[in-house]
Image (cartoon, coloured by chain):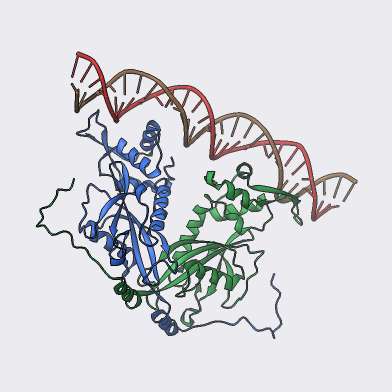
Chain colours: A green, B blue, C red, D brown
Amino acid sequence: MAEIKSKKAAAPQLHSKTLKGLQSEVQSINRVALSVDCVIFGFDENKLKVLLIRSDLKKYQNKFSLLGDLVKPDEDLEESAYRILKQRTGMNDLYLEQVHTFGEVGRHPAGRVVSVAYCSLINVQHHKLKNLANDLHWHDVDSVKELLFDHKKILDACYKWLQKRVQEHPLGFSLLPSKFSLRELQNLYEAILNRKLDRRNFRKKFFSMDFLVDMGEEEKNVPHRPGRLYKFDYEKYERKKKTWSGIDF
Amino acid sequence: MAEIKSKKAAAPQLHSKTLKGLQSEVQSINRVALSVDCVIFGFDENKLKVLLIRSDLKKYQNKFSLLGDLVKPDEDLEESAYRILKQRTGMNDLYLEQVHTFGEVGRHPAGRVVSVAYCSLINVQHHKLKNLANDLHWHDVDSVKELLFDHKKILDACYKWLQKRVQEHPLGFSLLPSKFSLRELQNLYEAILNRKLDRRNFRKKFFSMDFLVDMGEEEKNVPHRPGRLYKFDYEKYERKKKTWSGIDF
DNA sequence: AAATAATGTGTTTATTTTACACAATAATTT
DNA sequence: AAATTATTGTGTAAAATAAACACATTATTT
Protein backbone atom coordinates (compact mmCIF):
# COMPACT_ATOMS: atom_id res chain seq x y z
CA MET A 1 0.00 0.00 0.00
CA ALA A 2 1.71 3.19 -1.13
CA GLU A 3 1.28 6.04 1.30
CA ILE A 4 -0.23 9.12 -0.21
CA LYS A 5 2.37 11.86 -0.29
CA SER A 6 1.66 15.42 0.75
CA LYS A 7 0.87 17.81 -2.03
CA LYS A 8 4.26 19.45 -1.63
CA ALA A 9 6.15 16.32 -2.59
CA ALA A 10 7.11 16.56 -6.22
CA ALA A 11 5.25 14.15 -8.43
CA PRO A 12 7.68 11.91 -10.24
CA GLN A 13 8.91 13.92 -13.15
CA LEU A 14 7.41 12.80 -16.38
CA HIS A 15 10.12 12.32 -18.92
CA SER A 16 8.84 13.17 -22.28
CA LYS A 17 10.25 13.35 -25.73
CA THR A 18 8.80 14.42 -28.99
CA LEU A 19 8.62 11.96 -31.83
CA LYS A 20 10.66 14.40 -33.92
CA GLY A 21 13.38 14.40 -31.27
CA LEU A 22 13.49 10.63 -31.28
CA GLN A 23 13.50 10.62 -35.04
CA SER A 24 16.70 12.59 -35.12
CA GLU A 25 18.18 10.33 -32.45
CA VAL A 26 17.20 7.33 -34.48
CA GLN A 27 18.50 8.78 -37.68
CA SER A 28 21.80 10.24 -36.65
CA ILE A 29 23.58 8.94 -33.66
CA ASN A 30 23.16 5.56 -32.02
CA ARG A 31 22.98 3.53 -35.16
CA VAL A 32 24.61 0.21 -35.82
CA ALA A 33 25.06 -2.00 -38.80
CA LEU A 34 22.74 -4.98 -38.69
CA SER A 35 23.42 -8.24 -40.43
CA VAL A 36 21.72 -11.58 -40.78
CA ASP A 37 23.75 -14.78 -40.63
CA CYS A 38 22.16 -18.02 -41.81
CA VAL A 39 23.08 -21.38 -40.42
CA ILE A 40 21.91 -23.69 -43.18
CA PHE A 41 21.77 -27.32 -42.22
CA GLY A 42 21.60 -30.20 -44.64
CA PHE A 43 21.72 -33.98 -44.35
CA ASP A 44 23.77 -36.16 -46.63
CA GLU A 45 25.55 -39.50 -46.37
CA ASN A 46 24.01 -39.87 -42.94
CA LYS A 47 25.73 -36.81 -41.62
CA LEU A 48 24.49 -33.43 -40.57
CA LYS A 49 26.01 -30.78 -42.80
CA VAL A 50 26.29 -27.03 -42.70
CA LEU A 51 26.70 -24.73 -45.65
CA LEU A 52 29.76 -22.48 -45.51
CA ILE A 53 31.67 -20.15 -47.80
CA ARG A 54 35.11 -18.67 -47.60
CA SER A 55 34.94 -15.20 -46.16
CA ASP A 56 34.42 -12.62 -48.86
CA LEU A 57 36.83 -10.35 -47.05
CA LYS A 58 40.28 -10.55 -48.59
CA LYS A 59 41.99 -10.42 -45.25
CA TYR A 60 40.05 -13.46 -44.01
CA GLN A 61 39.85 -15.59 -47.12
CA ASN A 62 41.40 -18.55 -45.38
CA LYS A 63 38.54 -18.68 -42.90
CA PHE A 64 35.20 -20.26 -43.52
CA SER A 65 32.13 -18.27 -42.73
CA LEU A 66 28.38 -18.51 -42.46
CA LEU A 67 26.28 -17.02 -45.21
CA GLY A 68 25.24 -13.55 -44.25
CA ASP A 69 24.76 -10.01 -45.34
CA LEU A 70 23.87 -6.59 -44.06
CA VAL A 71 20.16 -5.99 -43.67
CA LYS A 72 18.87 -3.38 -46.09
CA PRO A 73 17.19 -0.33 -44.62
CA ASP A 74 13.81 -1.26 -46.05
CA GLU A 75 14.00 -4.98 -45.51
CA ASP A 76 12.43 -7.08 -42.76
CA LEU A 77 14.87 -9.36 -40.98
CA GLU A 78 13.26 -12.50 -42.33
CA GLU A 79 13.17 -11.05 -45.78
CA SER A 80 16.86 -10.49 -45.53
CA ALA A 81 17.45 -14.07 -44.49
CA TYR A 82 15.33 -15.36 -47.38
CA ARG A 83 17.28 -13.17 -49.78
CA ILE A 84 20.52 -14.78 -48.63
CA LEU A 85 19.06 -18.26 -48.93
CA LYS A 86 17.67 -17.57 -52.37
CA GLN A 87 20.99 -16.27 -53.62
CA ARG A 88 22.74 -19.51 -52.87
CA THR A 89 20.11 -22.19 -53.08
CA GLY A 90 17.65 -20.72 -55.54
CA MET A 91 14.83 -21.69 -53.22
CA ASN A 92 12.60 -19.43 -51.25
CA ASP A 93 10.27 -21.85 -49.53
CA LEU A 94 12.79 -23.10 -47.05
CA TYR A 95 12.27 -23.74 -43.40
CA LEU A 96 13.63 -20.71 -41.59
CA GLU A 97 13.59 -19.58 -38.01
CA GLN A 98 15.27 -16.90 -35.97
CA VAL A 99 17.50 -18.24 -33.22
CA HIS A 100 19.48 -15.54 -31.45
CA THR A 101 21.02 -12.13 -31.88
CA PHE A 102 24.73 -11.62 -31.38
CA GLY A 103 25.73 -8.09 -30.56
CA GLU A 104 28.97 -8.00 -28.64
CA VAL A 105 30.77 -4.75 -29.25
CA GLY A 106 33.98 -6.27 -30.53
CA ARG A 107 32.59 -9.12 -32.57
CA HIS A 108 33.28 -7.60 -35.99
CA PRO A 109 36.49 -5.87 -37.11
CA ALA A 110 34.69 -3.45 -39.41
CA GLY A 111 32.93 -1.74 -36.55
CA ARG A 112 29.74 -2.34 -34.65
CA VAL A 113 27.81 -5.01 -36.46
CA VAL A 114 24.97 -6.75 -34.69
CA SER A 115 23.95 -10.00 -36.26
CA VAL A 116 20.66 -11.84 -36.10
CA ALA A 117 21.19 -15.57 -36.56
CA TYR A 118 18.67 -17.60 -38.53
CA CYS A 119 18.57 -21.36 -38.84
CA SER A 120 17.45 -22.97 -42.04
CA LEU A 121 16.98 -26.59 -43.03
CA ILE A 122 17.31 -27.72 -46.59
CA ASN A 123 17.14 -30.90 -48.56
CA VAL A 124 20.54 -31.44 -50.10
CA GLN A 125 19.20 -33.77 -52.81
CA HIS A 126 16.43 -31.60 -54.17
CA HIS A 127 18.11 -28.26 -54.05
CA LYS A 128 21.33 -28.11 -55.93
CA LEU A 129 23.40 -25.13 -54.93
CA LYS A 130 23.49 -22.08 -57.14
CA ASN A 131 26.34 -19.64 -57.27
CA LEU A 132 29.23 -21.61 -55.92
CA ALA A 133 31.38 -18.50 -55.64
CA ASN A 134 33.66 -18.27 -52.66
CA ASP A 135 33.97 -22.00 -52.31
CA LEU A 136 30.41 -22.64 -51.22
CA HIS A 137 30.27 -26.18 -49.84
CA TRP A 138 28.66 -28.48 -47.38
CA HIS A 139 30.77 -29.29 -44.33
CA ASP A 140 30.26 -31.94 -41.69
CA VAL A 141 28.94 -30.10 -38.66
CA ASP A 142 31.11 -32.18 -36.37
CA SER A 143 34.30 -31.33 -38.16
CA VAL A 144 33.89 -27.56 -38.21
CA LYS A 145 36.57 -26.26 -35.90
CA GLU A 146 37.06 -22.58 -36.49
CA LEU A 147 35.07 -19.98 -38.33
CA LEU A 148 35.21 -16.32 -39.09
CA PHE A 149 34.72 -13.93 -36.16
CA ASP A 150 32.16 -15.42 -33.77
CA HIS A 151 30.52 -17.62 -36.39
CA LYS A 152 31.52 -20.80 -34.58
CA LYS A 153 29.63 -19.56 -31.56
CA ILE A 154 26.65 -18.83 -33.78
CA LEU A 155 26.85 -22.28 -35.34
CA ASP A 156 27.05 -23.92 -31.93
CA ALA A 157 24.02 -22.00 -30.73
CA CYS A 158 22.03 -23.02 -33.78
CA TYR A 159 23.12 -26.63 -33.52
CA LYS A 160 22.00 -26.79 -29.91
CA TRP A 161 18.80 -25.06 -30.87
CA LEU A 162 18.21 -27.67 -33.58
CA GLN A 163 18.85 -30.57 -31.24
CA LYS A 164 16.24 -29.26 -28.89
CA ARG A 165 13.79 -28.07 -31.48
CA VAL A 166 13.76 -31.32 -33.42
CA GLN A 167 12.43 -33.07 -30.34
CA GLU A 168 9.52 -30.68 -30.04
CA HIS A 169 8.53 -30.11 -33.64
CA PRO A 170 8.65 -32.30 -36.71
CA LEU A 171 11.07 -30.14 -38.62
CA GLY A 172 13.54 -32.87 -39.47
CA PHE A 173 11.47 -33.72 -42.53
CA SER A 174 12.71 -30.55 -44.21
CA LEU A 175 16.11 -32.19 -44.40
CA LEU A 176 14.89 -35.35 -46.15
CA PRO A 177 13.57 -36.08 -49.62
CA SER A 178 9.79 -35.95 -49.69
CA LYS A 179 9.72 -39.75 -49.77
CA PHE A 180 11.93 -41.46 -47.26
CA SER A 181 12.33 -44.75 -45.48
CA LEU A 182 12.15 -45.04 -41.73
CA ARG A 183 15.79 -45.98 -41.71
CA GLU A 184 16.66 -42.65 -43.33
CA LEU A 185 14.48 -40.85 -40.83
CA GLN A 186 16.17 -42.60 -37.96
CA ASN A 187 19.62 -41.91 -39.37
CA LEU A 188 18.68 -38.25 -39.51
CA TYR A 189 17.60 -38.14 -35.89
CA GLU A 190 20.67 -40.04 -34.82
CA ALA A 191 22.88 -37.61 -36.71
CA ILE A 192 21.22 -34.57 -35.20
CA LEU A 193 21.04 -35.90 -31.67
CA ASN A 194 24.38 -37.60 -31.96
CA ARG A 195 23.30 -40.85 -30.36
CA LYS A 196 21.88 -44.22 -31.27
CA LEU A 197 18.17 -44.81 -31.00
CA ASP A 198 16.34 -48.10 -30.66
CA ARG A 199 14.91 -49.04 -34.03
CA ARG A 200 11.71 -50.62 -32.86
CA ASN A 201 10.88 -47.90 -30.41
CA PHE A 202 11.69 -45.28 -33.01
CA ARG A 203 9.27 -46.81 -35.48
CA LYS A 204 6.61 -47.26 -32.86
CA LYS A 205 6.89 -43.62 -31.86
CA PHE A 206 6.59 -42.28 -35.37
CA PHE A 207 3.71 -44.53 -36.28
CA SER A 208 1.81 -43.61 -33.15
CA MET A 209 2.24 -39.93 -34.06
CA ASP A 210 0.22 -40.79 -37.12
CA PHE A 211 1.65 -38.15 -39.43
CA LEU A 212 3.43 -40.57 -41.76
CA VAL A 213 1.73 -41.66 -44.94
CA ASP A 214 2.70 -44.99 -46.50
CA MET A 215 3.41 -44.29 -50.17
CA GLY A 216 3.03 -47.94 -51.12
CA GLU A 217 6.49 -47.83 -52.65
CA GLU A 218 9.81 -49.29 -51.70
CA GLU A 219 13.41 -48.20 -51.78
CA LYS A 220 15.29 -48.99 -54.97
CA ASN A 221 18.91 -49.94 -55.51
CA VAL A 222 19.66 -50.97 -51.98
CA PRO A 223 21.75 -54.13 -51.54
CA HIS A 224 19.30 -55.67 -49.09
CA ARG A 225 15.64 -55.90 -48.39
CA PRO A 226 14.17 -52.51 -49.34
CA GLY A 227 12.23 -50.45 -46.83
CA ARG A 228 8.89 -48.82 -47.42
CA LEU A 229 8.73 -45.19 -48.34
CA TYR A 230 6.69 -42.66 -46.40
CA LYS A 231 5.93 -39.00 -46.60
CA PHE A 232 5.15 -36.57 -43.84
CA ASP A 233 1.59 -35.29 -43.85
CA TYR A 234 2.11 -31.58 -43.25
CA GLU A 235 -1.59 -30.80 -43.55
CA LYS A 236 -2.64 -33.30 -40.94
CA TYR A 237 0.11 -32.02 -38.70
CA GLU A 238 -1.07 -28.44 -39.12
CA ARG A 239 -4.59 -29.47 -38.17
CA LYS A 240 -3.51 -31.43 -35.14
CA LYS A 241 -0.52 -29.59 -33.86
CA LYS A 242 -2.48 -27.81 -31.16
CA THR A 243 -2.73 -31.05 -29.24
CA TRP A 244 0.78 -32.06 -30.07
CA SER A 245 3.45 -32.07 -27.44
CA GLY A 246 6.65 -33.24 -28.95
CA ILE A 247 8.55 -36.27 -30.03
CA ASP A 248 10.97 -36.64 -27.15
CA PHE A 249 13.51 -39.39 -27.58
CA MET B 1 29.35 -36.60 -57.92
CA ALA B 2 30.12 -33.30 -59.63
CA GLU B 3 31.40 -33.70 -63.14
CA ILE B 4 34.73 -32.07 -63.74
CA LYS B 5 34.27 -29.17 -66.10
CA SER B 6 36.57 -28.47 -69.03
CA LYS B 7 39.32 -25.96 -68.41
CA LYS B 8 37.48 -23.41 -70.51
CA ALA B 9 34.56 -23.23 -68.12
CA ALA B 10 35.00 -20.19 -65.93
CA ALA B 11 35.78 -20.97 -62.32
CA PRO B 12 33.13 -19.53 -60.04
CA GLN B 13 34.01 -15.92 -59.60
CA LEU B 14 35.43 -15.18 -56.22
CA HIS B 15 33.63 -12.24 -54.72
CA SER B 16 35.99 -10.33 -52.57
CA LYS B 17 35.81 -7.17 -50.57
CA THR B 18 38.36 -5.29 -48.61
CA LEU B 19 37.85 -4.76 -44.92
CA LYS B 20 38.11 -0.99 -45.55
CA GLY B 21 35.32 -1.22 -48.08
CA LEU B 22 33.14 -3.05 -45.64
CA GLN B 23 34.04 -0.56 -42.97
CA SER B 24 32.64 2.27 -44.99
CA GLU B 25 29.55 0.23 -45.78
CA VAL B 26 29.12 -0.50 -42.11
CA GLN B 27 29.71 3.09 -41.13
CA SER B 28 27.67 4.97 -43.65
CA ILE B 29 24.80 3.34 -45.34
CA ASN B 30 22.83 0.34 -44.17
CA ARG B 31 22.61 1.29 -40.56
CA VAL B 32 19.64 0.98 -38.30
CA ALA B 33 18.77 2.11 -34.82
CA LEU B 34 18.89 -0.76 -32.36
CA SER B 35 16.95 -0.86 -29.15
CA VAL B 36 16.49 -3.25 -26.29
CA ASP B 37 13.06 -3.82 -24.78
CA CYS B 38 12.78 -5.54 -21.43
CA VAL B 39 9.82 -7.63 -20.43
CA ILE B 40 10.14 -7.62 -16.67
CA PHE B 41 7.96 -10.15 -14.93
CA GLY B 42 7.08 -10.10 -11.27
CA PHE B 43 4.79 -12.14 -9.04
CA ASP B 44 2.49 -10.56 -6.49
CA GLU B 45 -0.85 -11.43 -4.94
CA ASN B 46 -0.69 -14.74 -6.75
CA LYS B 47 -0.63 -13.09 -10.11
CA LEU B 48 1.98 -12.78 -12.76
CA LYS B 49 2.83 -9.13 -13.30
CA VAL B 50 4.68 -7.16 -15.89
CA LEU B 51 6.38 -3.82 -15.41
CA LEU B 52 5.19 -1.07 -17.75
CA ILE B 53 5.55 2.68 -18.13
CA ARG B 54 3.63 5.21 -20.07
CA SER B 55 5.34 5.92 -23.33
CA ASP B 56 7.87 8.70 -22.99
CA LEU B 57 6.80 9.99 -26.35
CA LYS B 58 4.33 12.85 -25.98
CA LYS B 59 2.24 11.66 -28.85
CA TYR B 60 1.75 8.24 -27.27
CA GLN B 61 1.46 9.13 -23.60
CA ASN B 62 -1.84 7.35 -23.29
CA LYS B 63 -0.26 4.05 -24.24
CA PHE B 64 1.65 1.78 -21.96
CA SER B 65 5.00 0.52 -23.06
CA LEU B 66 7.76 -1.87 -22.17
CA LEU B 67 10.94 -0.50 -20.68
CA GLY B 68 13.47 0.01 -23.39
CA ASP B 69 16.12 2.24 -24.81
CA LEU B 70 18.42 2.59 -27.75
CA VAL B 71 21.59 0.56 -27.51
CA LYS B 72 24.68 2.74 -27.19
CA PRO B 73 27.35 2.34 -29.82
CA ASP B 74 29.87 0.92 -27.35
CA GLU B 75 27.48 -1.21 -25.36
CA ASP B 76 26.85 -4.94 -25.54
CA LEU B 77 23.20 -5.89 -25.91
CA GLU B 78 23.02 -7.46 -22.50
CA GLU B 79 24.77 -4.51 -20.96
CA SER B 80 22.12 -2.32 -22.42
CA ALA B 81 19.37 -4.47 -20.95
CA TYR B 82 21.04 -4.41 -17.53
CA ARG B 83 21.33 -0.63 -17.74
CA ILE B 84 17.59 -0.37 -18.29
CA LEU B 85 16.86 -2.74 -15.44
CA LYS B 86 19.20 -0.93 -13.10
CA GLN B 87 17.61 2.43 -13.89
CA ARG B 88 14.22 1.29 -12.71
CA THR B 89 14.86 -1.39 -10.15
CA GLY B 90 18.23 -0.41 -8.75
CA MET B 91 19.34 -4.01 -9.09
CA ASN B 92 21.87 -5.44 -11.42
CA ASP B 93 21.92 -9.08 -10.49
CA LEU B 94 18.63 -9.92 -12.06
CA TYR B 95 17.77 -12.94 -14.11
CA LEU B 96 17.95 -11.85 -17.72
CA GLU B 97 17.73 -13.67 -21.00
CA GLN B 98 17.40 -12.71 -24.62
CA VAL B 99 14.22 -13.94 -26.25
CA HIS B 100 13.73 -12.65 -29.76
CA THR B 101 14.54 -9.78 -32.08
CA PHE B 102 11.79 -7.77 -33.69
CA GLY B 103 12.77 -5.98 -36.83
CA GLU B 104 9.80 -5.37 -39.06
CA VAL B 105 10.36 -2.33 -41.21
CA GLY B 106 7.28 -0.45 -40.10
CA ARG B 107 7.29 -1.32 -36.42
CA HIS B 108 8.42 2.08 -35.16
CA PRO B 109 7.15 5.47 -36.29
CA ALA B 110 10.48 7.22 -35.82
CA GLY B 111 12.12 5.18 -38.54
CA ARG B 112 13.85 1.85 -38.70
CA VAL B 113 14.31 0.61 -35.17
CA VAL B 114 15.14 -3.02 -34.59
CA SER B 115 14.50 -4.19 -31.08
CA VAL B 116 16.03 -7.06 -29.17
CA ALA B 117 13.63 -8.33 -26.52
CA TYR B 118 14.95 -9.48 -23.17
CA CYS B 119 13.01 -11.21 -20.47
CA SER B 120 13.78 -10.52 -16.84
CA LEU B 121 12.35 -11.95 -13.65
CA ILE B 122 12.32 -9.98 -10.46
CA ASN B 123 11.16 -10.39 -6.95
CA VAL B 124 8.55 -7.74 -6.32
CA GLN B 125 8.98 -7.87 -2.54
CA HIS B 126 12.73 -7.45 -2.33
CA HIS B 127 13.23 -4.90 -5.05
CA LYS B 128 11.24 -1.77 -4.56
CA LEU B 129 11.04 0.21 -7.74
CA LYS B 130 13.24 3.26 -8.20
CA ASN B 131 12.38 6.16 -10.39
CA LEU B 132 8.67 5.92 -10.78
CA ALA B 133 8.66 8.50 -13.55
CA ASN B 134 6.25 7.93 -16.39
CA ASP B 135 3.82 6.01 -14.25
CA LEU B 136 6.00 2.98 -13.72
CA HIS B 137 3.78 0.22 -12.36
CA TRP B 138 3.14 -3.48 -12.21
CA HIS B 139 0.27 -4.69 -14.36
CA ASP B 140 -1.47 -8.05 -14.36
CA VAL B 141 -0.14 -9.86 -17.40
CA ASP B 142 -3.59 -11.21 -18.20
CA SER B 143 -5.19 -7.80 -18.25
CA VAL B 144 -2.74 -6.10 -20.60
CA LYS B 145 -4.70 -5.44 -23.75
CA GLU B 146 -2.87 -2.94 -25.86
CA LEU B 147 0.63 -1.56 -25.78
CA LEU B 148 2.77 0.86 -27.72
CA PHE B 149 3.79 -0.17 -31.22
CA ASP B 150 4.37 -3.94 -31.33
CA HIS B 151 5.06 -4.22 -27.61
CA LYS B 152 2.05 -6.44 -27.04
CA LYS B 153 3.48 -8.89 -29.54
CA ILE B 154 6.80 -8.73 -27.71
CA LEU B 155 5.09 -9.30 -24.38
CA ASP B 156 3.16 -12.26 -25.76
CA ALA B 157 6.33 -13.80 -27.15
CA CYS B 158 8.09 -13.42 -23.81
CA TYR B 159 5.14 -14.78 -21.89
CA LYS B 160 5.04 -17.89 -24.07
CA TRP B 161 8.76 -18.20 -23.76
CA LEU B 162 8.45 -18.04 -19.97
CA GLN B 163 5.73 -20.68 -19.88
CA LYS B 164 7.95 -23.05 -21.77
CA ARG B 165 11.19 -22.12 -20.11
CA VAL B 166 9.87 -22.48 -16.59
CA GLN B 167 9.19 -26.15 -17.30
CA GLU B 168 12.74 -26.77 -18.36
CA HIS B 169 14.74 -24.65 -15.94
CA PRO B 170 14.15 -23.66 -12.36
CA LEU B 171 13.92 -19.96 -13.02
CA GLY B 172 10.66 -19.37 -11.23
CA PHE B 173 12.57 -18.94 -7.99
CA SER B 174 13.79 -15.54 -9.17
CA LEU B 175 10.23 -14.34 -8.81
CA LEU B 176 9.86 -15.46 -5.20
CA PRO B 177 11.33 -14.28 -1.92
CA SER B 178 14.43 -16.28 -1.04
CA LYS B 179 12.37 -18.15 1.55
CA PHE B 180 9.04 -19.42 0.35
CA SER B 181 6.43 -22.00 1.15
CA LEU B 182 5.49 -24.74 -1.25
CA ARG B 183 2.07 -23.16 -1.56
CA GLU B 184 3.68 -19.96 -2.84
CA LEU B 185 5.79 -21.93 -5.25
CA GLN B 186 2.77 -23.77 -6.55
CA ASN B 187 0.76 -20.56 -6.85
CA LEU B 188 3.60 -19.17 -8.93
CA TYR B 189 3.62 -22.11 -11.31
CA GLU B 190 -0.12 -22.04 -11.57
CA ALA B 191 -0.05 -18.34 -12.37
CA ILE B 192 2.60 -18.75 -15.03
CA LEU B 193 1.12 -21.84 -16.64
CA ASN B 194 -2.40 -20.63 -16.11
CA ARG B 195 -3.77 -23.92 -14.84
CA LYS B 196 -4.30 -25.81 -11.61
CA LEU B 197 -1.76 -28.37 -10.50
CA ASP B 198 -2.23 -31.27 -8.13
CA ARG B 199 -0.82 -30.28 -4.77
CA ARG B 200 0.54 -33.66 -3.73
CA ASN B 201 2.14 -34.40 -7.06
CA PHE B 202 3.60 -30.93 -7.16
CA ARG B 203 5.26 -31.39 -3.79
CA LYS B 204 6.47 -34.84 -4.67
CA LYS B 205 8.03 -33.54 -7.84
CA PHE B 206 9.88 -30.70 -6.18
CA PHE B 207 11.12 -32.83 -3.32
CA SER B 208 12.37 -35.51 -5.66
CA MET B 209 14.32 -32.85 -7.57
CA ASP B 210 16.20 -32.36 -4.34
CA PHE B 211 17.09 -28.71 -4.82
CA LEU B 212 14.90 -27.36 -2.02
CA VAL B 213 16.42 -26.75 1.38
CA ASP B 214 14.17 -26.84 4.42
CA MET B 215 14.89 -23.65 6.38
CA GLY B 216 13.37 -25.05 9.56
CA GLU B 217 11.07 -22.04 9.69
CA GLU B 218 7.40 -21.52 9.17
CA GLU B 219 5.20 -18.91 7.60
CA LYS B 220 4.04 -16.13 9.91
CA ASN B 221 0.77 -14.25 9.99
CA VAL B 222 -1.26 -16.64 7.95
CA PRO B 223 -4.82 -17.34 9.12
CA HIS B 224 -4.33 -21.08 9.05
CA ARG B 225 -1.76 -23.72 9.69
CA PRO B 226 1.57 -22.24 8.52
CA GLY B 227 3.63 -23.96 5.91
CA ARG B 228 7.33 -24.65 6.09
CA LEU B 229 9.75 -22.33 4.37
CA TYR B 230 12.29 -23.51 1.83
CA LYS B 231 15.01 -21.98 -0.25
CA PHE B 232 16.30 -23.04 -3.61
CA ASP B 233 19.84 -24.39 -3.56
CA TYR B 234 21.37 -22.66 -6.58
CA GLU B 235 24.81 -24.13 -5.95
CA LYS B 236 23.58 -27.68 -5.89
CA TYR B 237 21.58 -27.00 -9.02
CA GLU B 238 24.62 -25.59 -10.79
CA ARG B 239 26.58 -28.70 -9.91
CA LYS B 240 23.87 -31.10 -11.02
CA LYS B 241 22.22 -29.34 -13.89
CA LYS B 242 24.11 -31.35 -16.48
CA THR B 243 22.01 -34.38 -15.64
CA TRP B 244 18.87 -32.35 -15.28
CA SER B 245 16.14 -32.60 -17.80
CA GLY B 246 13.32 -30.36 -16.73
CA ILE B 247 10.36 -30.15 -14.47
CA ASP B 248 7.55 -30.87 -16.86
CA PHE B 249 4.10 -30.53 -15.37
C1' DA C 1 -14.47 -24.76 22.61
C1' DA C 2 -15.81 -24.95 17.97
C1' DA C 3 -15.13 -23.64 13.33
C1' DT C 4 -12.03 -22.58 9.68
C1' DA C 5 -8.57 -23.05 6.29
C1' DA C 6 -4.74 -24.69 4.88
C1' DT C 7 -0.65 -28.10 5.65
C1' DG C 8 1.56 -32.68 5.33
C1' DT C 9 1.62 -37.23 3.83
C1' DG C 10 1.18 -42.51 0.51
C1' DT C 11 -0.90 -45.65 -2.36
C1' DT C 12 -3.05 -47.29 -6.33
C1' DT C 13 -3.75 -47.04 -11.17
C1' DA C 14 -2.76 -45.69 -15.72
C1' DT C 15 0.49 -44.30 -19.02
C1' DT C 16 4.87 -44.00 -21.06
C1' DT C 17 9.39 -45.58 -21.85
C1' DT C 18 12.82 -48.90 -22.28
C1' DA C 19 14.92 -53.23 -23.43
C1' DC C 20 15.15 -56.87 -26.23
C1' DA C 21 14.92 -61.34 -30.56
C1' DC C 22 13.51 -63.57 -34.59
C1' DA C 23 11.31 -64.53 -39.02
C1' DA C 24 10.86 -62.45 -43.77
C1' DT C 25 12.79 -60.44 -47.94
C1' DA C 26 15.49 -58.73 -51.75
C1' DA C 27 20.06 -58.59 -53.61
C1' DT C 28 24.53 -60.60 -54.21
C1' DT C 29 27.77 -64.25 -54.30
C1' DT C 30 29.10 -68.93 -55.11
C1' DA D 1 19.71 -72.49 -57.96
C1' DA D 2 21.40 -72.51 -53.48
C1' DA D 3 23.67 -70.12 -49.84
C1' DT D 4 25.02 -65.81 -47.89
C1' DT D 5 24.34 -61.22 -46.57
C1' DA D 6 22.24 -57.12 -44.81
C1' DT D 7 18.40 -54.97 -43.48
C1' DT D 8 13.33 -54.78 -42.87
C1' DG D 9 9.23 -55.57 -40.11
C1' DT D 10 7.05 -56.80 -35.94
C1' DG D 11 5.36 -57.50 -30.22
C1' DT D 12 5.82 -58.15 -25.43
C1' DA D 13 7.39 -57.83 -20.80
C1' DA D 14 9.53 -55.00 -17.26
C1' DA D 15 10.57 -50.58 -15.43
C1' DA D 16 9.86 -45.87 -14.75
C1' DT D 17 6.99 -42.03 -14.63
C1' DA D 18 2.71 -39.48 -14.14
C1' DA D 19 -2.00 -39.00 -12.52
C1' DA D 20 -5.70 -39.52 -9.42
C1' DC D 21 -7.18 -39.31 -5.07
C1' DA D 22 -8.57 -38.66 1.09
C1' DC D 23 -7.74 -37.85 5.69
C1' DA D 24 -5.56 -36.57 9.96
C1' DT D 25 -2.96 -32.42 11.75
C1' DT D 26 -2.23 -27.67 13.20
C1' DA D 27 -2.39 -22.68 13.84
C1' DT D 28 -5.76 -19.05 13.80
C1' DT D 29 -10.07 -16.88 14.29
C1' DT D 30 -14.64 -16.66 16.11
User: Whole-percent x and y of residue A54?
Assistant: 53, 75
Q: Which of the pair B143/A119 is nearer the observer?
A: B143
Corner quadrant of residue A23: bottom left
Of A218 and A59, nearer the camera is A218
Could you tell whether A75 is left or right of A125 in the image?
A: left
Residue A215 visible at all: yes
> Horizontal and vertical percent for residue A138?
59, 68
Extreme-bottom residue of the structure: B8
* Residue A206, percent from left and from top: 62, 45
Residue B215 image position (x, y, % from top left): 24, 37
Q: Quadrant of residue A130?
A: bottom right
Answer whether residue B234 is visible to the viewer in this image.
Answer: no
Query: Would you place residue B123 above or below residue B249 in this image?
Result: below
The answer to whether residue A145 is above or below residue C18 is below
Residue at 63 percent of width and 47 percent of height: A211
Q: Residue at x 50, y 66 (%)?
A: A78
Left or right of A151 on screen, residue A120: right
Q: Return the residue nearer the eye: B107 or A68.
A: B107
Residue B184 image-quadrant placement = top left
Q: Is residue D24 above or below residue B102?
A: above
How many dots with numbers? 0
Task: Point out the image quarter for the N terminus of chain B.
Answer: bottom right
> Where's the C terminus of chain B, which quadrant?
top left
Front residue of this view, candidates B32 and C14: B32
